[in-house]
Image: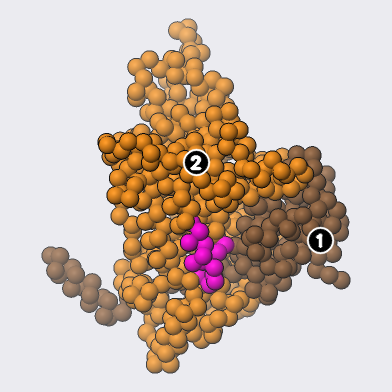
Amino acid sequence: MTAILRNNLSFASTARAELRGGGSGRSLYGLTKQEKVTPKGRYSEDPAAELMPAAEFLGTEPDFRPVLEDFVGSPFDPARRRVLGRLMGMFAVDYQSARNEERAFLRRLLLAGNPREGYVANRALHLCNALNVIRRTLALGVAESRFAAEPTRGFLGAVQARLAVTTFRMLGPKSRETIWNLLLASGTDAQHRSVPGADRILERALILKALAARRHRLGPWSRTGAVALTEISVFAEQIRTATRACLAARTTLWPGDTTRLAPKLATINEAGERAGYLAQGELDPVFAWQEHGARLEGAGGLPNTAAAPEGIEDALPELDRNPLLVRPRLHQALAENRALSRLSESACLALTEYLCGRKLNADRSASKDAALAILAQEGFDVASGEAVEAIRQDAQGIYRFDAALAFSDLLSRYTGATYVRRVFSDQITAGRDPIGQITRALTQGLAVPIMINEMAINNMYSLAALAQAQQEGQPAFAMREPARNVDFVMSPALLLSPALPPLFGMRARADAYLAPAALDLLAPPFGLVFPELGIEDRL
Amino acid sequence: MSLLDYLNEGLIDTKGLRDALQPHVAEIAQAWRAEHIEPAGIELVAEMLARWASNLSDAAVSGQQLVAGVLFLTPAKPVLDLIEKAGQKPLRRVALAGLAVHLVDIAERLALEIYVPELPALHAKSDRTGDAARHVGVARHLKG
């Protein structure tokens, strides 16, 4: 949360941000004894951004001058650091409070072939609350080069890494367990001992990439979800204990290693078809692996007398089996059901009310049971009965469920943003400008969901501000209420008024909005740049 | 007049994606929602096309070639129809990227249509029941 808010602040001041040397100490070079030094304090706009180079490099290097020379011309050159400089701030905080594994990870990230993309991935994974070990694994998969000749070509892209994390989090309990077991077994032999020469970090990154490539088949109403999971399991078992060179060459179709080319590639001469073939290999490592003949060049043949202990940096913790983790998937099932109509409207409503902890009469209770039965029968790994009870108890009691994060998981793959819930009245009391925030988000092309509360009957419903508009010559918002299929234009003043017109409900007022926070706001869709369309990487 | 006729004018102009596409994005999203098309499938097709475009140098690909190339993702028929219509004239790199971004826009709009109405339920919690309040009280008592 802190990271998100700080990031938002920095976004607001992008135009006038001056890093003033970025805290690397580089500004000292231009300073001679004769120059006047102003006694004013030198306050950075983003103090954390100042710390990263100092913390990472000066902490281990007694003479910092050679280190700073290495910066020049690199993406970390303070003279060229803009948004990226601010990205560094997040890792400075990590670094200072980090344990050894985080420090080792940051060093490895900086030494990788494409640290810039790795940083972008690490930042996005931070913002979507990825588990630390998964974040590190994926960021290294992004930053480290597949082929020595092409250092910036990683094992997956930053956006793919983020999609892998949200896909994993949105899985049902059994699927999550299956994937976790595959991750645990990576790089080990049948006796669960680490195999020297195997690269378990890359194996895990590729398993998660394969998961992201099947995200459209893993939804709660999917009919092919089990097949998709089987494909991933087979792939994970086939690549287990493979050498790094084998993983690099055989999980892509890109001809980076001429000794390990996919046989079919040589037979495709038509440029358009070849591009499509390569694209499919970039999208899905399982396809690439199969096109290479699914042949393992393992490290398992090496003498395994001294099985490598699991490194502290790649030890997976126990899988989090908190039943609240399945609540977003339940809501995904209910939301998608509005179009699919597998559950009746009354069954949907009854289940929603039950999840929210409300008391149900006998009829409603029967509808809820019917809904759960259909979910168990027709849904794909949605939730167990015990999980539903736990969710209900949470809603009735302490309420630890993070609804904004759940909503982000539902939408981030489409909008590229994560969301922070902000209450209008709180924002105004704190002197913030909610209308300005909404306007800025709309300017960046991001829709802003808004919740309306009908106070007289304690009912909430949601709208989305889609674009800026004009109403009687004044700036306004183009709004949509998807549930009722209604479009309208609304003035900002009306949105902040204590009571909306009766048209909006009984004593209605705008309660809260979901502010899109930075995630991929500055990265192009799928991390691919097309400057001719104005789609550029502004990091 | 067909829903996809706007594609006859192409997706891009000299400045990038045509501004006039946005109303069509909304129209198509609503039509596809009625046909139970999931945004997840559209988004992945868009990714495939974007990667295809990034690997394409000077060549062009036809709509039929594109349809054949994304079939492994089993997209819905209306999605395939849109791709085929957009590729009635072979698409070069930038035009293909434009098609991918157009599909991203449609998927985003469709996702908003589907998931925004679920927002109040996601945030809902009950007023604390007497039973739950008693449990909290007991827990505090036991904790000391």
Please indicate whether residue A278 sits to the left or right of residue A348 in the image: right
**Spot occupied by residue A121 in the image (x, y as percentages of width and height):** 50, 43
Give the distance between the C-alpha atoms of the residues marked 1 and 2, in whole angstroms: 39 Å
Stretch of the chain drawn in magenta: A216-232
Residue A220 located within the stretch drawn in magenta: yes
Q: Amino acid at mark 2?
A: Leu
Task: Give the residue at mark 1.
Answer: B85
The kind of residue on which mark 1 rests is Lys
Circle count: 2
Whether residue B47 is situated above or below residue A308 in the rendered picture: below
Q: Secondary structure at mark 1?
A: helix
Vertical position of residue A394 compared to residue A517: above or below: below
Q: Nearer the viewer, mark 1 or mark 2?
A: 2
Q: Color used for chain B?
A: brown
Which of the 4 image quarters holds residue A399? bottom left
Residue B61 point in image, percent of width and height: 79, 49
Q: Is residue B10 visible?
A: yes
The structure residue drawn at horizontal position 67% and vertical position 48%, both measured from the top left corner, is: A277
The residue that mark 2 highlights is A247
Q: Chain of mark 2?
A: A
Q: Position of residue B137 (x, y in %)?
A: 20, 73
Asked whether residue B54 appears in the rendered view, the answer is no
Q: Residue at x 70, y 48 (%)?
A: A276
Q: Which chain is orange?
A: A
